[in-house]
Image: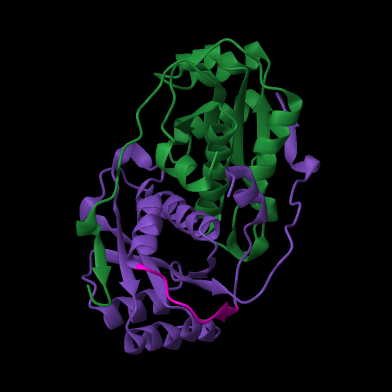
Chain colours: A green, B purple
């Protein structure tokens, strides 16, 4: 899929069909996440892949509306590893760029993805950290359910000229 | 350009050749920015396009190392408009996803881009806000110089298996 088409047609997918995601496809998606621009090349991210159904249920339990994760073969938890941080106050942007590359790569591979936020909801951070045995210096940022889409959503034109300024505000 | 190729081959471009960026291309890039996933669809971003050379010099003045902006036909300042914020503590991630889509779209269109951070450096936020007459509720987040690349950088394989965990930390 062409890059602009991928960017313009990506939608949040919340209904999934049966079907696995191969290790090769998973690695392509993770490689996309790790290819994201980040502050000073600090690469402060880590990734936890959820495939075990019992572990997936723990994720679902942390949300009021994450039951669609029962239908995905994998979820990826993007995490901030504070022990890798070199430049303060940039971790949210760095985790966000890795996250978007994961969603775009999944879409380009014909899969669908949903972004379920963890941070900044403290109870969710605590619940996910505990469920997966993450150390205190790790902050789970967001969960991405990834699988075969069972819904087709039309592309939206989200361009708004009123949000663009030229040379002066 | 195919989406995975675009993600894997994108590099920060700091040397630019002569050549304009058409209004149509600029709009494609801005549309990509506005197509980014964002928290609860709050779309709290705004975009300031710098084309005037005098205004470009004001951006350059805010940095120790932004002279490459003399060689780009456009720069885009991604801004957080606090008056549009619905969900607190998410604006950095929302601005970061818009920013990445801008860089990926530029790359896909054969252009090069460089991410110059503004936030969280307070003096830069103040300098840019003042230079462009931005109101107090607007936080300039980052500047993207975009133009025709005058350097070719090889793709880097940034995959690190040690950053991936499976089902347990």
Residue that appears at 38% across and 43% down: B38
Report the number of numbered marks.
Answer: 0
Give yes or no for residue B19 being in the magenta stretch.
yes
- Residue B97: percent from left, percent from top: 45, 50
Residue that appears at 31% across and 63% down: B47
Residue A52: name its quadrant. top right
Residue that appears at 42% across and 30% down: A12
Taking the image as shown, residue A96 lies to the left or right of residue B24, namely: right
For the N terminus of chain A, which image quadrant? top right
Compared to B17, does A145 lie above or below?
Answer: above
Taking the image as shown, residue A80 lies to the left or right of residue A163, namely: right
**Chief secondary structure of the magenta portion:** loop
Q: Which range is magenta?
A: B15-22
- Residue B98: percent from left, percent from top: 42, 53
Give yes or no for residue A107 being in the magenta stretch.
no
Compared to A84, does A135 lie above or below?
Answer: above
Compared to B159, does B130 lie above or below?
Answer: below
* Nearer to me, A168 or A134: A168
- Residue B31: percent from left, percent from top: 35, 52
* Nearer to me, A168 or B38: A168
For the C terminus of chain A, which image quadrant? bottom left
- Residue B35: percent from left, percent from top: 37, 45
Residue that appears at 31% across and 68% down: B48
Compared to B68, does B111 lie above or below?
Answer: above
Q: Is residue A135 visible?
A: no
């Amino acid at each position: 899929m062409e890059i602009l088409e991928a960017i313009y047609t990506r939608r949040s997918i919340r209904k999934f069909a049966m079907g696995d995601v191969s290790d090769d496809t998973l690695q392509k998606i993770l490689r996309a996440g790790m290819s994201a621009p980040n502050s000073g090349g600090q690469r402060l991210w880590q990734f936890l892949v959820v495939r075990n159904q019992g572990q997936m249920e723990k994720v679902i339990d942390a949300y009021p509306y994450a039951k669609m994760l029962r239908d995905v073969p994998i979820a990826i938890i993007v995490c901030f590893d504070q022990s890798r941080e070199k430049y303060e106050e940039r971790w949210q942007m760095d985790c966000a760029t890795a996250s978007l590359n994961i969603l775009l790569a999944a879409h380009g591979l014909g899969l669908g993805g949903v972004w379920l936020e963890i941070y900044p909801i403290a109870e969710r951070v605590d619940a996910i950290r505990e469920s997966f045995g993450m150390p205190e210096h790790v902050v789970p940022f967001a969960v991405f359910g990834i699988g075969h889409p069972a819904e087709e959503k039309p592309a939206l034109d989200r361009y708004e000229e009123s949000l663009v300024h030229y040379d002066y505000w």
